[in-house]
């Protein structure tokens, strides 16, 4: 089909190849059409593919590596003779824009604004590879055969020392892996046991949810949760009548008067012992009664007392 491309283009009758060098010049448009609409400002619209994972600063969404955008490519400088290009594109999840430029010195892309990089870089030192300290070593490795042979020997020694334990483990487990029936039997047995435990746990959780009238997933219990549950002791619910009765018993056990040790239940308030109880209370509080005064005391002396007694009380006492 390539040889018929020229025949598929329509040339109008007034087209003059001496005057018009091409159909684009005849129609007055650029060969890149809409991609070159900002070419007068040094901006060319290209299809840019995201080189690594980033986070958009405007909406906070994650943009994965390989997502393609219509980016505005601009030349902003040179690193020696290599041009430094900057790409500006719009996030497809929001109205924000972010800019990324090339870094020829580090052979990488650098985010200028609008986003931040998700750090997932390859560290050669952590993966047991030789790390070049400087560019001189890299040039020496590319040009010096003896230096390259020395580095290849180091890589081979590391690879051999690391692969030896793996080979020993393979030989050790080879006899166990040879019996496929036993391995399959053990795996199926463990799977059935796990399904049985999961089914029983689901039934127990359903009972708890039904009892508590909740519809939320329950997490598996742990030893710490069981220990905390044992520390809580739920007290029985007491009725209002029982609480009122307990209060009455507490009040009944309290002292009637300050300084007395007798409770109301210990004092006999019968009429036959009323006078004796009065004397007992008077002697406890230091109350002097008229009937208890000695005969030498003048009858005109008046003693203040908290309790007054009459002769009728003495008659009752004599009769008793």
Image (cartoon, rainbow, N blue to C red):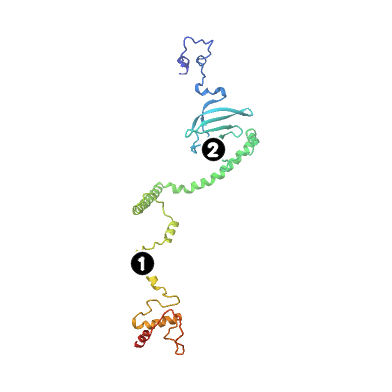
Q: Quadrant of residue 312?
A: bottom left
- The quarter of the rendered structure image containing the N terminus is top left
Is 102 rendered above or below residue 237? above
Q: Which disc number belongs to residue 82? A: none
Tell me the element at label 1.
Answer: helix
Q: Residue at x 57, y 24 (%)?
A: 41
Residue at the extreme front: 300
Find disc 1 in the rendering and name its residue. Answer: 244
Counting residues from the start of the chain, the first of labels 1 and 2 encountered is: 2
Residue at image point 47% right, 17% down? 5
Give the image location of residue 99, x and y in percent.
Answer: 55, 32
Numbered badge on residue 116:
2
Neighbours of disc 1 within 10 Å: few (<14), some (14-19), many (20+): few
Give the class, few, some or many, for how many residues have Cα within 10 Å of label 2's Cα (few <14, many ≥20).
some
Label 2 sits on a secondary structure element that is strand
Tell me if I can see residue 240 in this picture. yes
Quarter of the figure that contains the C terminus: bottom left
**In the image, residue 192 above or below residue 117:** below
């Amino acid at each position: 089909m390539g040889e018929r491309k020229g025949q598929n283009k329509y040339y109008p009758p007034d087209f003059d190849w001496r005057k018009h060098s091409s159909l684009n010049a005849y129609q007055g448009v650029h060969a890149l059409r809409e991609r070159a609409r900002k070419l007068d400002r040094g901006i060319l619209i290209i299809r840019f593919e995201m080189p690594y994972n980033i986070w958009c600063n405007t909406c906070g969404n994650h943009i994965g590596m390989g997502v393609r955008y219509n980016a505005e490519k601009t030349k902003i400088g040179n690193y020696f003779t290599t041009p430094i290009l900057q790409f500006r594109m719009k996030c497809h999840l929001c109205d924000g824009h972010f800019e990324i430029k090339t870094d020829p010195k580090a052979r990488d892309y650098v985010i200028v604004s609008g986003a931040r990089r998700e750090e997932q870089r390859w560290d050669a030192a952590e993966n047991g590879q030789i790390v070049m300290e400087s560019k001189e070593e890299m040039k020496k490795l590319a040009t010096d055969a003896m230096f390259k042979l020395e580095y290849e020997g180091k890589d081979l020694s590391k690879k051999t020392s690391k692969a030896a334990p793996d080979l020993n483990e393979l030989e050790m487990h080879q006899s166990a892996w040879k019996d496929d029936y036993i391995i399959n039997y053990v795996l199926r047995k463990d799977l059935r046991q796990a399904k049985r435990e999961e089914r029983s746990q689901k039934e127990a959780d359903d009972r708890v949810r039904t009892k508590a009238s909740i519809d939320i997933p329950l997490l598996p219990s742990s030893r710490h949760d069981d220990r905390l549950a044992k520390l809580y002791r739920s007290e029985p619910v007491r009725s209002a009548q029982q609480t009122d009765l307990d209060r009455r018993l507490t009040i009944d056990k309290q002292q009637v008067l300050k300084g007395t040790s007798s409770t109301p239940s210990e004092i006999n308030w019968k009429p036959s012992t009323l006078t004796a109880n009065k004397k007992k209370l008077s002697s406890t509080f230091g109350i002097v009664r008229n009937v208890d005064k000695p005969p030498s005391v003048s009858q005109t002396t008046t003693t203040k007392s908290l309790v007054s007694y009459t002769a009728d009380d003495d008659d009752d006492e004599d009769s008793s």
